[in-house]
Image (cartoon, rainbow, N blue to C red):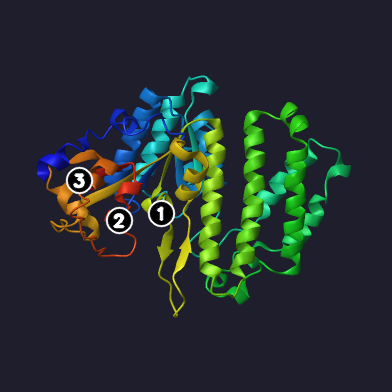
Amino acid sequence: MATDLQETVHALDATAVMGLFPAAPRVLALGEPTHGAEGLLDMRNDLFRQLVEREGYLTIALESGCLAGLAVDEYVTTGAGTLDDVVARGITHDWAAFPGNRALVRWMREHNEGRPAAERVRFAGFDGPLEFSHAESPRQALTALHTHLAARLDAALLPCTADTLDGLLGPDAAWTEPAAMLDPARSHGQSAEAARLRLLADDLVTLLETQTPHLLAVTTPDEWDRARLHARTATGLLRYHARMADPSPARMAGLLSLRARMMADNLLALAERGPVLAFAHNSHFQRPRSTMALWNGLPPAHWWSAGALVGARLGTAYGFVATAVGTLARHGVDAPPPGTLEGLLHALPQDRFLVDAPALAAILADAPPTPRESPWFGYAPQDPAHLADTDGIAFIKCA
């Protein structure tokens, strides 16, 4: 068995990753089983540098807020701001503190120094402006979209004024109320003002689309990309807030689906610009339908991840390499039991390697590994049942 397993193993580098696919994926998704482990972030940074230098990738997209990430992209492409400030403001979910994220941004800025614009690496967040405790106000996205259109089109074409938007938006605290995450009655998402804003947002997005020929002529490519980002973020946030106000048992499944759609829409837009390395939790990239157990007797939530949505659109131009680890000592994850997938990989001599997942699934078809139990919330071992739906497994013995 060990000899057969060894035949599926390759060096963990960009050349081997590209060898998993018939052509370079437009979106190459690199998953992680937990957030913040230094070994995982170091591996990601190494792989991105190699993809830039060997394979022509120029964009990395993290599981971080899409609007906040604009500050990081501005820094790495132009040098505007300082490293400390843009990392603190531009990487969300409290992940700015991870040394690997700071090292990534520093390298991107150093790489871009003196290079022409077409050769500069780019940074993006592809998550919505969402946190674990709340969703952001749609103010930033809506007002930015309105400002973009008002500066380039006749005022008579716009469905409302900036003052009208401001009045309907009201205080941001009404949108960001933390209690609304678990109590739909505390959500502002189905108020009369929110309903009116959804109609106006739709009108503004339609105006952006119907005026495309003119707007492209008077807008730089980066301005156009940013306007489209603000457009889909405004509508996505308003949908999300409306779902937060839904008291039905399908509420959580709806919220998870909407977050996945926002992620997928952002990745597809980035892929229009060129190939993208996307980095997030494995669960956001898996192709099979996702399931989450809920509380208070609610039925499990089912939804399609961002990766499943992107894969449905891109086909073979979407690639997914999951990451599995043997031990995470700092988080109390001990060496994996021998009968698990991680245990089988942990027994191989290499410390860090890439596995051809479909080939491994075929070898293990007659004796499937047992799932490895998770010792803590936030760490997700690789599900052996999904092995054949994954293009590769990046394995690190100790992360």
Residues under labels 1 and 2: Cα distance? 10 Å
| Image coordinates for residue 348, horizontal then vertical, percent | 13, 43
For mark 3, what is the residue? 363
Q: In the figure, is residue 351 to the left or right of 22?
A: left
Q: In the figure, is residue 32 to the left or right of 313?
A: left
Q: Residues within 10 Å of mark 3 (few under 14, many from 20)?
A: some
- Vertical comparison of 83 with 388: above or below: above
Q: Comparing marks 3 and 2, which lies closer to the viewer?
A: 3
Res. 385 mark: 2
Residues under labels 1 and 3: Cα distance? 21 Å
Q: Is residue 52 visible?
A: yes
Q: In the figure, is residue 245 to the left or right of 118?
A: right
> Which quadrant holds residue 43?
top left
Res. 142 mark: none
Task: Identify the residue at the far right of this view.
Answer: 156
Nearer-N-terminus badge (1/3): 1
Q: Is residue 383 visible?
A: no
| Image coordinates for residue 10, horizontal then vertical, percent | 22, 34
Res. 288 mark: 1
What residue type is disc 2 on? Ala
**Helix, strand or loop status at disc 2:** helix
**Helix, strand or loop status at disc 3:** helix
What residue type is disc 3 on? Ile
Residues under labels 3 and 2: Cα distance? 13 Å
